[in-house]
Every structure is written in structure tokens, then in C-alpha cells.
Amino acid sequence: MTYHVYMLKSLGKKSVTYVGYTNNLKKRIILHNSSKGAKFTRGRKWKLIYKEKLNSKSEAISREYYIKNNKTLRNKIKNENLNSFTL
């Protein structure tokens, strides 16, 4: 089974990001935007700005942790929108 690590950017006045992993990216983003995703994401609208495909859950968890804790990488993705996606 493949997993995705992803980063979302909020569409509000103050832009914040959220990093997560899932095995069904489209469904997960729909949940975030309908306030049924992670508690942090509730009440905001989100845009997918980064995704990465991995081969196992353990790889996805490890990569998610790395991105969440690497502020330089996270800000680079956020500010440059290196990969902007539409689902």
C-alpha cells in the first residue's frame, strides 16, 4: 500500500501550514476542508501545496516527522509553493 505525506496551506488571512500522512489523499483533504480532519485543521479551508508518495506507513511517518520539525524546509515549501496541486 502506498502512503502520501502532504502539506496544506490555509486560505485565510493568516497563512498556516499543516503536515500529515494518509493512504487516501483526496479523501483526507475533503475531510480537512469539511472540518472532520485533525483538530488543528477544523474551521479553516485548505489548499494542497506539497505531496510525496512513499511505499510504507513507517516511511510516511518518518518523513512527516522530518518535515514537521524542519522549519527551513517547511517555510521554503510554504513561501515558494514549489508544488501546488489541484485534486
Image (spheres, rainbow, N blue to C red):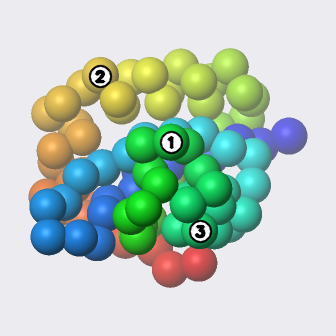
* Residue hosting label 2: 69
The answer to whether the residues at label 2 and label 1 have Cβ atoms under 8 Å apart is: no
Residue closest to the eye, 23 or 83: 23
Q: Amino acid at mark 2?
A: Asn
Question: Where on the picture, by quarter, is residue 35?
Answer: bottom right
Give the residue at the far front of this rendering: 43
Marks 1 and 3 sit apart, C-alpha to C-alpha, by 12 Å
* Residue hosting label 1: 39
In the rendered image, the vertical position of residue 82 relative to residue 70, given as above or below: below
Which mark is first along the chain, 3 or 1? 3
User: Residue visible at 18% across and 30% down?
Assistant: 71
Mark 3 burial class by Cα count in 10 Å: few <14, some 14-19, many 20+: some
Give the residue at the far bottom of this rendering: 86
User: Residue visible at 67% across and 44% down?
Assistant: 22
Question: Where on the picture, by quarter, is residue 74?
Answer: top left
How far across and how far down the image is residue 29, in percent? 59, 63
Q: Amino acid at mark 1?
A: Lys
Residue closest to the eye, 53 or 8: 8
Q: Amino acid at mark 3?
A: Ser
Residue 50 seen in render: no
Q: Depth-wise, is mark 2 or mark 1 nearer the camera?
A: 1
Which mark is first along the chain, 1 or 2? 1
* Residue hosting label 3: 34
Marks 2 and 3 sit apart, C-alpha to C-alpha, by 26 Å
The answer to whether the residues at label 1 and label 3 have Cβ atoms under 8 Å apart is: no
Marks 2 and 1 sit apart, C-alpha to C-alpha, by 19 Å
Mark 2 burial class by Cα count in 10 Å: few <14, some 14-19, many 20+: few
Q: Secondary structure at mark 1?
A: helix
The answer to whether the residues at label 2 and label 3 have Cβ atoms under 8 Å apart is: no
Give the residue at the far right of this rendering: 1
Residue closest to the eye, 70 or 44: 44
How far across and how far down the image is residue 9, in percent? 32, 60
